[in-house]
Image: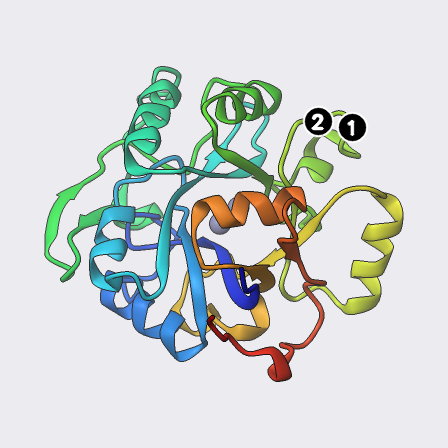
Amino acid sequence: MTLSPFRVDLHLHTVLSPCGELEMGAPEIVAACRKEGISLCAVTDHNATDNAPAVAAAAEGNPVVIPGMEVQSAEDIHMVVLFPDMETARSFQEWLWLEMPPIPNKPEIFGEQLIIDGENQIIGEQETLLVQGTGYGADEIAAEALGRGCLVIPAHMNRPSFSYEAVLGPLPDDFPCSALELSAALPRADFQEWCRRYPGRLFIRSSDAHRLCEISKDRCTLMMLESPSFSELALALKGQQGRSVLCPWEDFPSDRTSSSS
Ligand SMILES: [Zn+2]
Ligand SMILES: [Zn+2]
């Protein structure tokens, strides 16, 4: 087994997110990831997974694309949920949408919510507003997702809105999740302060890209993996079998670029 450092970005929006720019098409996201050397990415639109197959189709394995979702809880807390496969993603979305308020999107105000294929052909439009809180609490969403074998990462913990801290205060020690996400713009000194405040918690950095220019090697996290995949990611977040997450604010170890044996 050879472990190598891979760039990982677990928080990307597409044209399905009303706040995502229309340039966030499938081939464009793939090209941006390849340009930045990102080997593993997750498509995490608000409360929906419908465009993950499009990005995966465009990527053809480079980068490897994990289906995900940025869930908005009843308290308006954002949490990234990552799925082992599309089937799990679809069934989780069905569960989530049992408690989705039937508020229609207003594209002229919030933006369009387009469902596309791998070549950016529009194959549908989500008519229910995606940027709203579902009826489930953050604890309930985390427990349900983890119970289905998913990964749960409270999003942009350092942001003054839609983060766990901003809404409910400090994250309890026993809150069930796989890691905590910090925004890429966070200064290194602030990152160290977060580590002091949450000893024992694992932090990652993700782009939360809504525009192509926000997909960057400087906005992702390095992980030591055998290969870029969901199962390897799960091991790294648990620190098992030698897999690990490197300090998000650490430079790419160029002397250890990927090798195989
Ligand atoms: Zn968010
Ligand atoms: Zn986001």
Question: Percent from the top left, x then y, of residue 178?
Answer: 62, 38
Tell me the element at label 2: loop
The image quadrant that residue 121 belongs to is bottom left
Residue found 52% across the figure and 49% down from its top: 233
The relative height of residue 93 versus residue 220 in the rendered view (above or below) is above
| Residue, disc 2 | 175
Q: Is residue 220 visible?
A: no
- Mark 1 Cβ and ligand 1 under 8 Å apart: no
Please identify the residue farthest to the bottom as the structure is shown. 255
Residue 9 lies left or right of residue 67; in this view the side is right
Q: Who is closer to the viewer here, 258 or 215? A: 258
Residue found 58% across the figure and 45% down from its top: 235
Residue found 24% across the figure and 48% down from its top: 53
Amino acid type of the residue that numbered disc 2 sits on in the rendered structure: Phe
The relative height of residue 27 versus residue 37 in the rendered view (above or below) is above
Label 2: few (<14), some or many (≥20) within 10 Å?
A: few
The image quadrant that residue 228 belongs to is bottom left
Determine contact: label 1, label 2, CB under 8 Å: yes
Question: Percent from the top left, x then y, of residue 145?
Answer: 49, 26
Image colouring? rainbow
Amino acid type of the residue that numbered disc 1 sits on in the rendered structure: Pro
- What is the C-alpha distance between the residues marked 1 and 2? 5 Å
| Residue, disc 1 | 172
The relative height of residue 106 versus residue 194 in the rendered view (above or below) is above
Residue 216 lies left or right of residue 91; in this view the side is right
The relative height of residue 214 versus residue 182 in the rendered view (above or below) is below
Question: Percent from the top left, x then y, of residue 243?
Answer: 62, 53
Tell me the element at label 1: loop
Which circle marks residue 208 in the picture?
A: none
